[in-house]
Amino acid sequence: MATYYLTLPLSKDIRKSLHAGDICYLSGTLYTARDAAHKRLCRSMELNEALPVELANTTIYYAGPTPTPPNQVSGAIGPTSSYRMDPYAITLMCHGQRVTIGKGERSEAFREHLKQTSSIYFTAVGGLGALLSTHVLRSEVVAYPDLGAEAIHLLEVKEFPVLVGYDTFGNSIFKSEQK
């Protein structure tokens, strides 16, 4: 395992240099999106509608910030269970989205598509939402405000801590998947 300080978006070369278990501190722009936002994005693609965010080389964090306390940039922003996004994530990867952050294991279909597209899956530690929010420099709703906490937020982050859950070669940190 190695430790990296990385700036988003991540190039293909950087994604391919990371390995399951590596510790990374991400700085730059990422977007939050949960189930409802993913469903709308995919529906817009089916209808050939313009998307509210550019997907190429984006990082999507499966989270929905809690209300922002006074004098803070963001409320708690812990990861949600990623497996719920698997049916949508494959579609988004087909449209250029390459980096996801969440918690927990993913489907075999997702992992295969991850390898095919040289994409990467980071995990953030659940239960640390308040601490993770201290790495958010700016938070702005950029799409689907009617979804409340599930709206798409643009986040500018600094040294946002994550682990490589699945690397571009399909290697995993999850013990139940180790052979």
Image (spheres, rainbow, N blue to C red):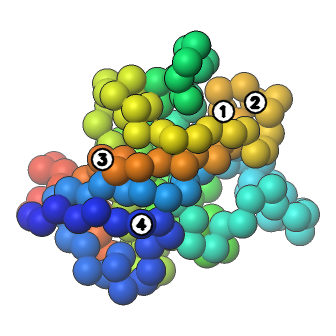
The residue tagged 3 is 161
Q: Mark 4 vs mark 3: which is more N-terminal?
A: 4
Image mark for residue 147: 2
Residue depicted at x 88% and y 64% = 50
Q: Amino acid at mark 1?
A: Glu
The residue tagged 1 is 150
Nearest to the eye among marks 1 and 4: give it.
Answer: 4
In three-dimensional space, the C-alpha distance between marks 1 and 4, rounded to whole angstroms, equals 25 Å
Nearest to the eye among marks 4 and 2: give it.
Answer: 4
Q: Is residue 59 left or right of residue 143?
A: left
Q: Mark 1 vs mark 4: which is more N-terminal?
A: 4
Q: Amino acid at mark 2?
A: Leu
Q: Position of residue 27 (x, y in %)?
A: 42, 57
**Farthest residue toward the front?**
71
Residue 10 appears anywhere in the view: yes
Within 10 Å of the Cα at label 2, are there few (<14), some (14-19), or many (20+) other Cα atoms? few
